[in-house]
Image (tube, rainbow, N blue to C red):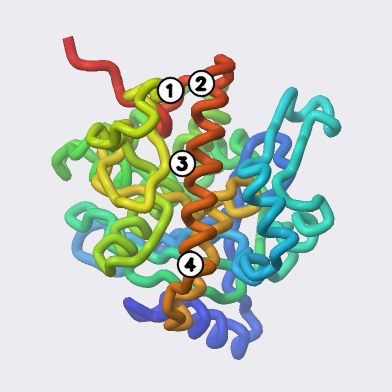
Amino acid sequence: MIAARGTPLVELDSKASEQDQPFGIITADCSSPHEYDDGIAVTPLPSSQELYRVQVFSVDTSSLYHDEKVLRRVLARTESLYQNMGTAEESYHPMLEPDTIKRMHFVAGKTRRALAISFLVGIVEPPTLETISFGRVTVGKNYNYKEFGAKCRYSERMQQFGRAAALIIGHLQTHESTEEVEDVYKGLIHVPKSASFKRGADINQAYMIAANHLVARQMRDEGRLAIYRTHDVQDNSAVEFKDPRIAHFSSTPGWHTGLGLDAYTRVTSPLRRGEDFVMHGLLRARAEGRLIDNRDTRIITTAIQRLNQRIMSQLFHGELQMARDDYLPAAAA
């Protein structure tokens, strides 16, 4: 089903339900995930040039934002910890209670509440936000990265996921001309068969980065409080402990130089990351027209402090791994 531009997910879901055809999504995650908390759907649109509607979904945790017991656990842990993933369940330390995760995460065949970020992307259309909304979705299939990567290359029906991801990368990351999008697509898709896991991970990551970026820009442009991921070279607080290459969290929007984006937040993994969980509460307030109050401000302040303390602790103990999401790229020679 193709919804009119700007149609909120809740309306789309209602129309789908009337036709007994629930709006379907898929998930793509690592080989042995402990929870599926994000999903995607891609729809080709009629256009003289290649154009897609992309919808990125994350489990709607906004109802838990007002549960003080849950919130305290989130602010204390700030993230789910994975060690020896896929080999030892006891090495998994979830941010939320396992029963809560099982009740909420995106399981194939189940209908779930979801946050949806809908945007357009095409040959001449950079990722352009349509709506940020809440609604219900039905999960059609849980893929791991290897399965998803193989499907995107070898299944004609699934190739649109790779095409849309290449367009996102071309516009947001490499800023290449439209004539060179085919090169981006080939570099993304035509890797050795043994690299299906990386292909699936890279495609899924493109969607998540775009969604997080577009939400951040919208919150910034509306002047709303949010938790931003940024490299702020002007911030000299705790300079004795900080590594200037590392992105940190702030209530002030700014450049995420590691990704080359002018605004970035995180909303796509609310079962795994504290910042995403808090953002779901703020996005629900936005959707309902609720003004931010003192409680929200305290939560944001506390969350940012805890998140930055975690980064500095990991840096001090040598536990912070190099990643584009955390570090500035190396300076050009």
Tell me what residue is drawn at x 58 percent, y 62 percent: 25
Question: For the residues marked 2 and 1, what is the alpha-carbon distance in whole angstroms?
Answer: 9 Å
Q: Amino acid at mark 3?
A: Gln
Q: Amino acid at mark 1?
A: Phe
Quarter of the image where one finds residue 211: bottom left
Q: Say which of 306 and 48 sits in front.
A: 306
Tag 2 and tag 3, C-beta contact below 8 Å? no
Q: Badge 1: few (under 14), some or many (20 or more) residues near its Cα, within 10 Å? A: few
Residue linked to disc 3: 205
The mark closer to the camera, 3 or 4, is: 4
Q: Amino acid at mark 2?
A: Leu
Question: For the residues marked 4 and 2, what is the alpha-carbon distance in whole angstroms?
Answer: 29 Å
* Figure check: 194 above or below 154: above
Horizontal and vertical percent position of residue 155: 53, 45
Q: Which of marks 4 and 3 precedes in the sequence?
A: 3
Tag 1 and tag 4, C-beta contact below 8 Å? no
Tell me what residue is drawn at x 42 percent, y 78 percent: 291
Horizontal and vertical percent position of residue 297: 46, 63
Residue linked to disc 2: 315
Q: Which of marks 1 and 3 precedes in the sequence?
A: 3
